[in-house]
Each structure stands twice: as structure tokens, then as C-alpha cells.
Image: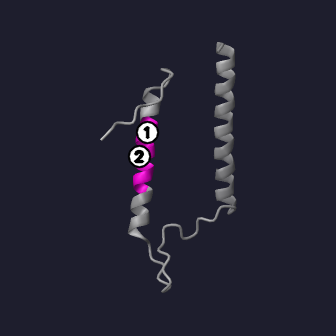
């Protein structure tokens, strides 16, 4: 594959991801995506307190994504995906 074609594909992929990010951000800001109560318990008794499990899951997900993003930045320009370590 030629360098021009590779750059074109790279540009399209980056444009798509940025567009997707923008759409989701706009929907979150305008209320199109409802996130009200996403960290609260959903019990039939009416108790809607903050759920420690949901907060922990959110934090661990963001931490894992941040670590992988750091690995991706380190391998940038090599043409390879970062390797996910085994157990």
C-alpha cells in the first residue's frame, strides 16, 4: 500500500473518531444522553444512594483506559499496537 493511501486512511479514521467524540460530547451536554443517576443504586425500595460498586467500576475503567492510552502514546510511530501484558 502506498504512503499516500496509508495517510488518507489514517486521516479518515482520525476524522471518524473525532466526529464520534464530538457527537457524544454534544449529546451529553444537551441532555440527549441521560446520565442522571448513573452512579446511584437502582433498588425497588426507593433507596437511590451512591453505589460504591458503580463508582469503583468507573474509576477502574478510566484507569485502565488511561494506562492503555499511555502505552499507545509510547508506541506511536512504530506502526504497532501496544501489547497487553498477560497474567
Q: Is residue 66 magenta?
A: yes
- The residue positioned 66% from the left and 58% from the top of the image is 29
Q: Quadrant of residue 54?
A: bottom left
Give the vertical position of 72 relative to 46 (above or below): above
Q: Which mark is residue 68?
A: 1
Give the image location of residue 36, x and y in percent: 58, 69
Against 75, residue 2 (above or below) is above
Please indicate whether residue 8 sits to the left or right of residue 39 in the image.
Answer: right
Q: Is residue 46 above or below residue 24?
A: below
Residue drawn at the location 46% of the way across and 38% of the way down: 69
Q: Quadrant for residue 71, please give it.
A: top left
> Marks 2/1: CA distance?
6 Å
Residue 87, horizontal then vertical, whole percent: 30, 41
**What residue is shown at x 64% (from left), y 33% (from top)?**
14
Q: Please report contact status of discs 2 and 1: CB closer than 8 Å, yes or no.
A: yes
Element assignment for label 1 = helix
Name the disc covering residue 64, or none: 2
- Disc 2 is placed on an element classified as helix
Q: Which mark is residue 59?
A: none
> Main SS type for the magenta part?
helix
Q: Residue 8: x and y, percent?
A: 69, 23
**Residue at the top extreme of this rendering:** 2
Left or right for 77, reference 83: right
Specify whether residue 80 is painted magenta: no
Q: Residue furthest left?
A: 87
Magenta-tinted stretch: 59-70
Amino acid at each position: 500500500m502506498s504512503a499516500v493511501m496509508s495517510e488518507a486512511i489514517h486521516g479518515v479514521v482520525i476524522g471518524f473518531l473525532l466526529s464520534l467524540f464530538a457527537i457524544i460530547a454534544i449529546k451529553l451536554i444537551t441532555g440527549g444522553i441521560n446520565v442522571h443517576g448513573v452512579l446511584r443504586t437502582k433498588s425497588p425500595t426507593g433507596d437511590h444512594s451512591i453505589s460504591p460498586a458503580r463508582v469503583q467500576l468507573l474509576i477502574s475503567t478510566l484507569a485502565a483506559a488511561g494506562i492503555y492510552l499511555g502505552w499507545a502514546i509510547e508506541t506511536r510511530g512504530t506502526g504497532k499496537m501496544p501489547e497487553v501484558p498477560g497474567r
